[in-house]
């Protein structure tokens, strides 16, 4: 089937515009870690960098809870109601109400945890600023700009805020005693970006907020429950691999592991760009899904091989010859790249758009719970190797699960 037969001229231009906007944003997100990651490792040392990563891993548990799968369900609803202004305002009102309510609840729980647990209380400001940073990021309405296929606005706001954050870190963080400034600077820039994005929604797009009825909130929660679980469940193995590594080893080991995972994230970013760019279009033109999946799998495979072959060069450039051990764990984690591409292709951009939300939910839940319990055994026993096995094993298993059911339901 030809792409040209599936797209009008305006749709092609919109897709290209969104792809370029997301590419600039994700490209910046690829570039900035290449600046901040080596800088922080050298200035703070692997131990303090590991402490930062551990605090973020704890805070990240709240992210999926706040977003509640809206990066799929809200995008889908907004894309289909793009010409109905009343419906758009209704969707935005409900989503914002739920997200803000969950954010307040998450902050309360995390505050109690920080105050009551001695290990966290000793680093009160580190955990507090990390929590606030993750919460402000989770509240950022990516779902709105993605659903409206107007991602250039999101890209501009995020690009500026991230550049300011990097400049702030490079200017203010000069020694290991100033490590708390890293989450503080990130939070400040993220919060300002959130305020600007909300102003754009209500002013530029003329969205009107109205207090939603309890029935609307309940209906949205029910509709989004499958997507929520499918987004939340991976944190059981993803964040837990870092969190448990911090509990059973030392911050320096966490720093090595997180440094390797950050490199993997850089290689994986193209999958996020393609998935987010095509999601609104595929929601309306499901006939294009098979070609999209082939594109994703080929891209993921090429990037996996490139990552494995260049691991030592990347580690040398980013972390110096003293930290070449990071290259070993980059190679161990590399198979997860193509698995992530497959998860997005067969899960978010295929099964969920074909109305099989429950299949995606069950796959994420079963695999995540299984590998969470596997991590409880192998991370304390094997340390960083156990974390690598947990991440790659879970992603490959989830990719195979989604691939099987996609072939079943697509036919």
Image (cartoon, rainbow, N blue to C red):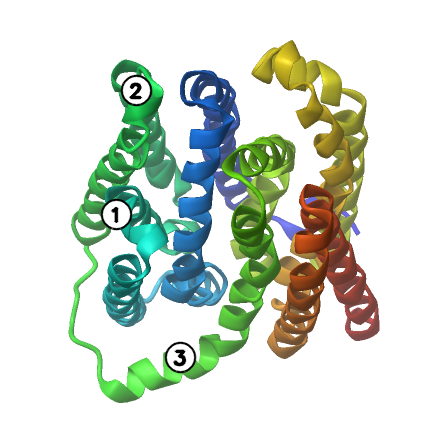
Q: Position of residue 178 (x, y in %)?
A: 28, 25
| Cα distance between the residues tagged 1 and 3 | 33 Å
Residue lying farthest front? 118
Q: Where is residue 31 in the image (x, y as percent from the top left)?
A: 50, 22
Q: Which of 90 and 307 is in front in this view?
A: 307
SS for dot 1: helix
SS for dot 2: loop
Residue 305 in view: yes
Q: Left or right of 208: which side holds 158?
A: right
Q: Where is residue 241 in the image (x, y as percent from the top left)?
A: 60, 52
For marks 1 and 3, give the one nearer the viewer: 1
Disc 2 and disc 1 in contact, CB within 8 angstroms: no
| Cα distance between the residues tagged 2 and 1 | 19 Å
Q: Nearer the viewer, residue 234 or 76?
A: 234
Above or below residue 170? Residue 410 is below
SS for dot 3: helix
Q: Mark 2 = which residue?
A: 173
Q: Residue 221 carries which label?
A: 3
Q: Left or right of 34: which side holds 264?
A: right
How many labels sit on residues? Answer: 3
């Amino acid at each position: 089937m030809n792409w040209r037969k599936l797209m009008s001229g305006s749709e092609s231009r919109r897709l290209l515009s969104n792809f370029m906007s997301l590419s600039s944003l994700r490209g910046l997100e690829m570039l900035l870690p290449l600046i901040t990651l080596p800088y922080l490792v050298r200035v703070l040392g692997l131990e303090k960098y590991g402490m930062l990563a551990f605090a973020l891993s704890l805070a990240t548990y709240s992210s999926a809870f706040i977003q509640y799968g809206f990066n799929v369900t809200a995008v889908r609803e907004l894309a289909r109601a793009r010409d109905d202004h009343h419906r758009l305002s209704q969707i935005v009102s409900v989503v914002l109400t739920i997200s803000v309510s969950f954010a307040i609840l998450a902050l309360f729980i995390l505050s109690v945890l920080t105050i009551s647990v001695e290990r966290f209380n000793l680093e009160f400001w580190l955990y507090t600023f990390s929590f606030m940073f993750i919460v402000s990021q989770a509240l950022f309405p990516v779902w709105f700009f993605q659903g409206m296929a107007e991602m250039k606005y999101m890209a501009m706001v995020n690009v500026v805020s991230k550049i300011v954050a990097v400049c702030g870190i490079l200017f203010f963080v000069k020694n290991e005693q100033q490590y708390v400034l890293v989450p503080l600077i990130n939070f400040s820039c993220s919060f300002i970006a959130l305020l600007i994005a909300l102003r754009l929604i209500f002013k530029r797009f003329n969205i009107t907020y109205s207090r939603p009825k309890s029935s609307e909130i309940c209906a949205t929660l029910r509709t989004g429950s499958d997507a929520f679980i499918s987004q939340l469940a991976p944190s059981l193995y993803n964040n837990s691999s870092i969190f448990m590594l911090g509990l059973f080893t030392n911050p320096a080991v966490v720093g090595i592991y997180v440094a390797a995972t950050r490199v993997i994230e850089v290689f994986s970013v193209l999958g996020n760009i393609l998935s987010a760019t095509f999601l609104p279009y595929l929601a309306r033109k499901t006939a294009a899904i098979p070609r999209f999946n082939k594109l994703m799998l080929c891209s993921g495979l090429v990037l996996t091989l490139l990552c494995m072959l260049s691991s030592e060069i990347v580690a040398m450039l980013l972390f110096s010859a003293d930290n070449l051990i990071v290259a070993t764990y980059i190679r161990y984690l590399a198979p997860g790249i193509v698995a992530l591409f497959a998860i997005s292709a067969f899960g978010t951009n295929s099964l969920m758009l074909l109305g099989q939300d429950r299949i995606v939910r069950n796959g994420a839940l079963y695999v995540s719970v299984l590998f969470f319990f596997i991590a409880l055994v192998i991370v304390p026993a094997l340390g960083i190797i156990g974390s690598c096995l947990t991440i790659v094993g879970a992603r490959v298993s989830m990719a195979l699960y989604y691939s099987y059911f996609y072939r079943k339901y697509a036919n």
